[in-house]
Amino acid sequence: MDAHDQHQSFIKTPQQLIVVILLAFLVPIIGIILLVQLVLNVAAPDPRTLTAEAVAERIQPVARLEFGAPGGAAGARSADQIVKTVCTACHQAGVANAPKFGDAAAWAPRIKTGLSAMVQSVIKGKGAMPPKAGDASLTEAEIQSTVVLMANQAGAKFKEKPAAAPAKTAAAPAADGKAVYDKCASPVMRSRSLARRSSATRLRGRRAPRPA
């Protein structure tokens, strides 16, 4: 009796047999499905993360790509010179979404912001463009004249602000020698000078010839 009980199956009813058969098929299938989902469940990349501005922002802490020639003397360059030496590297070919020269459609949204906003964008940097377009020696007046030139080529009608005229220093009036002497000389020196003058006058009076 004991030996028969050791080999007795735990399936005692037809219902239990059906359940065991179903589990034998379902458990491996479910495991395979979960494993496939785990392998294939990779989040799709956001298209905005692949733009040039987003990429430049992510790599900024470790690297920065700056375009532009070495800066010249501040205040000594015209807008044409700055365009040729600093701006052409990016705006000629449209590198990193930079608006090309004369492209009215690309420049239109920037022109709508106004001249001051465009100048500040250049000074502070925007997107892949570093501050002052990579030339730290550029003055605000030079940047403004360059922005006016490039924007007007694309249809803007900006007017460059005239440069401030240098302040003229008034010429000092000619100093009056007698007034300066009277102001600076001490009373003792003035009294001695007067005494010498009176002595000289008396001596000339004594030496004058008497009439015959």
Image (cartoon, rainbow, N blue to C red):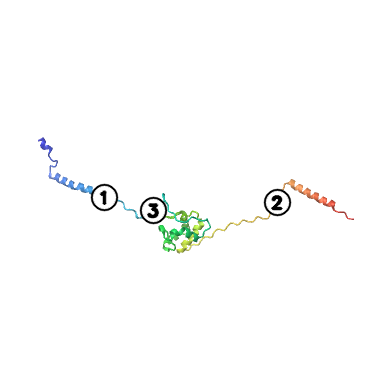
Which amino acid type is shown beneath numbered disc 2?
A: Val
Dot 1 corresponds to which residue? 37
Dot 3 corresponds to which residue? 55
Judging depth in this view, the residue of 132 and 92 nearest the camera is 92
Which amino acid type is shown beneath numbered disc 3?
A: Val
Q: Does 138 sit left or right of 187 as displayed?
A: left
| First in sequence: mark 1 vs mark 3 | 1
Tag 1 and tag 3, C-beta contact below 8 Å: no
Query: What residue occupies the far right of the structure in this picture?
Result: 212
| Label 1 neighbour load within 10 Å: few <14, some 14-19, many 20+ | few
- Label 1 and label 3: CA atoms lie apart by 30 Å
| First in sequence: mark 2 vs mark 1 | 1
For marks 2 and 3, give the one nearer the viewer. 3
Which quadrant is the C terminus positioned in?
Answer: bottom right
| Label 3 neighbour load within 10 Å: few <14, some 14-19, many 20+ | some
Q: Residue at x 74, y 47 (%)?
A: 189
Image-quadrant location for residue 98: bottom left
**Residue 55 screen position, x and y as percent:** 38, 53
- Label 2 and label 1: CA atoms lie apart by 101 Å
| First in sequence: mark 2 vs mark 3 | 3
Give the secondary structure at mark 1: helix
Above or below residue 102? Residue 123 is: above
**Residue 71 screen position, x and y as percent:** 49, 55
**Residue 67 screen position, x and y as percent:** 44, 56
Above or below residue 188? Residue 97 is: below
Q: Residue at x 39, y 55 (%)?
A: 52
Dot 2 corresponds to which residue? 180
- Label 2 and label 3: CA atoms lie apart by 73 Å
Give the secondary structure at mark 3: helix
